Amino acid sequence: MKKKVANREFRLDLLVCAGTGCVANHSYEIKEELEKEINRHGLQKEVRVITTGCNGFCERGPIVVVQPDGIFYQRLTKKDVPYLVEEHLLKGRPVKKLMYIPSPEEPPIPKMMDIGFFRHQRLIVLKNRGRIDPENIEEYIGFDGYQALEKALTKMTPEEIIAEIKASGLRGRGGAGFPTGSKWELCRKTRSAIRYIVCNGDEGDPGAFMDRSVLEADPHAVIEGMVIGARAIGAHNGFIYVRKEYPLAVKRVKIALVQAEEYGLLGENILDTGFDFSIDVVQGAGAFVCGEETALLASIEGKVGRPRPRPPYPTESGLWNKPTNINNVETWANVPTIILRGAKWFSSIGTKGSKGTKIFSLVGKINNTGLVEVPMGITLREIINDIGGGIPGGKEFKAVQTGGPSGGCIPNSLLDLSIDYDSLTKVGSMMGSGGMIVMDEDTCMVDVARYFLNFMQEESCGKCPSCRLGTKHMVQILNRITEGKGEEGDIEFLEDIGKNVKLASLCGLGQTAANPVLTTIKYFRDEYLAHIKEKRCPALVCKSLISYVIDAELCSGCTVCAKNCPSDAITGEPKEIYTIDQKKCTKCGICLTVCPPKFKAVKKVSPPVK
C-alpha cells in the first residue's frame, strides 16, 4: 500500500473540533464563519479549515487549534471569528482573550500542549484526536494509518499476530480486563469454519463518552484493529454494535467503512492478500444490559437483549452458536499501534499487570471536564489535580467513582491510589470502561449510592431474581434513609443483600450493581449513621432532611427572595426581617440562589426545622 502524506501546502490549518459536545455548541457554525472570513480576506490559498473529531477538552468547546503553531482557542462564538481571523491570520497576532486561562490571576496559555489538561496525558488510542478529519481516509493514512494492517497481512502469520498481542499485555478495556491475546487465541483454536468478531460500542454509563468519542474522532483505527483481529482469529464477518443515541458516531463509522472498502482495505481480497473480511453496523436501542457481551450477541441476532449463562463463553459459542470474539472500541483501537510499534514498546508503558494507557471520561465536580488518556499506574491525585485542574470554587475533593454506575466510590484518603486493574479492585471499585465521576464536599454519598443503584435496578433485564428483587429492595431501603425514615439495622441489611446480589447474579450488571452502596458504606459509614440516627444529611442534599431558613441577623428585608419564591412561602415587610413558612416551602432552593452575596441571609440547615 502506498503511504499518503498529509497535505502541507497551506500556511496554516485551523482544526475545528466537531465532536458531539462541540457540535452541540455550534462548532459547525464556527467553521462556516471561519471559511467566510478567510474567503473575504482572500486567504483561502493559505489557510485551510478542517473539522476534526473530539479534541478532548469538552468543557472548553467550541475549540479551534491553529497549526503548526499549536495555538489553542476555546469557547468561541461566531462574533469572535472576524476579530480572530484579522488579528491572528492576517496580522500574525494571536488573540489572548480567546485562549485558555487557568484562573483570573494567571496569564493565558497560548499553546495547547502547555495546558495542564493536555500536557500530562499519554496518547495511543487518542493520538489522532483533534488533528485529522475523521471523514477523510487519506488524513488517517497520512498519519501511518493502515500501515499496521499491511504489516499484519503481508509479513505476519495469524499466530504471530496473536503472539504479539499477548506479549503486549493488552487487556480488554471494556471492563473485565481479560487478556486480549488469550481471548483471540481461544477463539482461533475452536474447531469451526465460521467465526465472528464484534466491536462492543454499547456505552451506557452515565457521564461516559469514551467509545463515542473514539468512533467519532478516529473510526479507521477501530476498523483497522478489527481487520487485524479478524486475520488473527480467522473470521470473515464482523459487527460494530453502537447505540442509536450516537448518530454522529454511526455516521462517521459508516463513511469510514465505505472508504476502507474503496481503498481495498476492507471487503474482498484485502491488499491483494486473498483475505476477505466485511463489517456491518448494528444499532442498539439503548438498553444498558446490552453492554454485557452475551446480551449484546442476543441483540445482534434480533432477540431480546438478556444475558445467558457462561460457559459456554462467546469464544466457544457466540453469534448463531459460532465462535465469536468481542472487544470494545478502545481495545480494538489499541491493536494497530501495538502491531506497528511492537509489543515491547507497548508493554513498557503502565504497570506489571496493567499495560499501556486507559481512556477516562473525567466529569462531575472538576474544573477540566473532558476525555483523557493516561498511562496505567498514574494516581488519582494526578488525574484530578494536574489534568482535571482540581475542584471548582475551592471546594474539597470528597470522592471519585470509577468504572461507571456499578463502580465503587473512592474517598479522599485514597487519592494517591494507582490507577490499574488490581489496585481499583482491591479498594472495592473497578476499571470498568472508563467513567470517572468526581464529587466534592457538597455531595451526599448516601444519595449518590441511591442514584446509581436506582439506575442499575431500572436497567436490570429482570432475568435473575437476585438482581431484579435484590436491587429493588436495596433501593427501597436507601429511599427510606434519604427520607429520614432509616432504621437501626438498615446498614447491615444493605451489606447483606448487596453481597448476595453480587454472588447470585448471572451477569456483570448484577454482580457489580451493589458496588456503589458497599463502598459508600465502607468509606462513608458516618454519613449513613447521621441519616439514620440523627435524621440529618451532613452534605445538606436530601430534601426530607433539610430546611431553608432566613438568618434574622443578616436579613436586610431586600424582598428579593420573596419575589422569587414560586410557592409564596416567604413573607415579611420591605426592610424588615423575612421568614420562610416551612409548610409551604417546596425546598427548591431558589431563595438561596437569589439572596444577594453581600447578605447571605438564606441558609440551608439539617436536621430540618419542624
Image (spheres, rainbow, N blue to C red):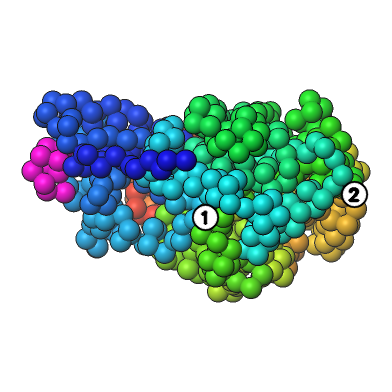
Q: Is residue 135 visible?
A: yes
Residue at 64 percent of width and 35 percent of height: 274
Whether residue 537 sits left or right of residue 519 in the image: it is left
> Residue at left 39%, top 58%?
117
N-term-proximal mark, 2 vs 1: 2
Residue 540 in percent (x, y) is at: 57, 56
Instruction: Give the answer, above or below, for where 284 lies relative to 76.
Output: above
- Give the number of the disc on residue 95: none
Image position, residue 551 (x, y; %): 45, 56
How would you rate the neighbour count of disc 1 (Cα within 10 Å): few for under 14, some for 14-19, many for 20 or more? some
Query: Left or right: 65 with respect to 433?
Result: left
Amino acid at the residue labelled 2: Pro
Q: Nearer the viewer, mark 2 or mark 1?
A: 1
Q: Nearer the viewer, residue 378 or 60?
A: 378
Amino acid of disc 1 = Leu
Does residue 266 sit above or below 218 in this rendering? above
For this rendering, which residue is in front, 142 or 43? 142
Residue 293 sits in quarter:
top right
Q: Dot 2, crowdedness within 10 Å: few (<14), some or many (≥20)?
A: few
- Element type where label 1 sits in the image: helix
Image x and y of residue 463, in percent: 88, 39
Q: Which residue is mark 2?
A: 311
**Principal secondary structure, stretch drawn in magenta:** helix
> Which is nearer the eye, 289 or 396?
289
Write down the region rendered in magenta: 85-94
Task: Check disc 1 and report the residue beneath it.
Answer: 340
Is residue 393 shown to the viewer in this render? Answer: no
Q: Is residue 352 magenta?
A: no
Q: Alpha carbon of mark 2 to alpha carbon of mark 1: how far?
A: 34 Å
Judged from the image, the secondary structure of the residue bearing numbered disc 2 is: loop
Residue drawn at point x = 84 percent, y = 56 percent = 502
Residue 608: x %, y % from top left = 62, 54
